[in-house]
Image: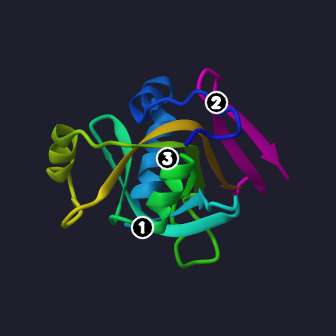
Amino acid sequence: MESAYPLPAGVSWSAFATAEPAFADRVAARFRLYRHQVLATLRKDGSPRTSGLEVSFSQGELWLGMMPASRKAHDLHRDPRFALQANPGAGAEIADGDVRVAGRAIEVTDPAVITAFRHTENPPPGPFHLFRTELTEIVWSGLNAEEEEMVITLWRPGHPLHESRRH
């Protein structure tokens, strides 16, 4: 089903990493700190649904894998828009910053791609849905303790990296 809202053009993880390699490394490192992340999808009535999820970086893509017939998979089949937040961890402070990624998730059904994905690090056991992401926005926010300020770094396809600071 097509979204009722116009969707900005998204890009692959590799296109993002080519455009902003240092920022891409920082974002991927933050996601790799924990196995489980937080995925937000849209329910049929338009309200948000958050779910735990494992992500994978391989073959130049950021992948979302999920169990067959899961609610989050149904949500993405209906409306591909998603937001993904790196696991904030157990502490009150997020020492490595907070990372959020937004875009569209496109299900991949090509058996060759699924077979290749099964040979990546930590492949899911049994059957699964596999979604390739098209990224529309990536945000890192954190504290610069020396300057006692919040730093927000934003990237969108076709735009330069933008950093803002708040005291």
What residue is drawn where x is 48% and y is 50%?
Answer: 77
User: Are the two marked residues, 3 and 1, in contact with CB atoms closer than 8 angstroms?
Assistant: no
The number of numbered badges drawn on the structure is 3
Which amino acid type is shown beneath numbered disc 1? Ser
For marks 3 and 1, give the one nearer the viewer. 1
Instruction: Give the image quarter of residue 33.
Output: bottom left
The alpha-carbon separation of the residues under discs 3 and 1 comes to 27 Å
Q: Answer with mark 3 or mark 1, whichever residue precedes in sequence.
A: 3
Residue 43 is situated, as x and y percent measured from the top left of the image, at: 62, 62
**Up-down relation of residue 94 to residue 91 (above or below):** above
Q: Quadrant of residue 154?
A: top right
In this rendering, is residue 105 above or below 148? above
Does 128 sit left or right of 12 as displayed? left
Task: Identify the mark at residue 27; answer none if there is no mark.
Answer: 3
Q: For this rendering, which residue is in front, 50 or 29?
A: 50
| 148 drawn magenta | yes
Residue at horizontal 49%, vertical 47%?
27
- Tell me the crowding category of disc 3: few under 14, some 14 to 19, or many 20 or more residues within 10 angstroms, Cα based: many
Identify residue type, mark 2. Pro
Closer to the camera: disc 3 or disc 2? 2
Q: Which element type, helix, strand or loop, lies under badge 2? A: loop
Q: Earlier in the sequence, mark 1 or mark 2?
A: 2
Residue annotated with mark 1:
70
- Residue 71 shown in magenta: no
Q: Which residue is mark 2?
A: 8
- The nearer-to-camera label among 1 and 2 is 1
Question: Magenta part of the protein: which range?
Answer: 144-167
Residue 141 screen position, x and y as percent: 66, 52
Secondary structure of the residue carrying tag 3 is: helix
Mark sitting on residue 9: none
> Which of the two labelled residues, at mark 3 and mark 2, occupies the earlier sequence position?
2
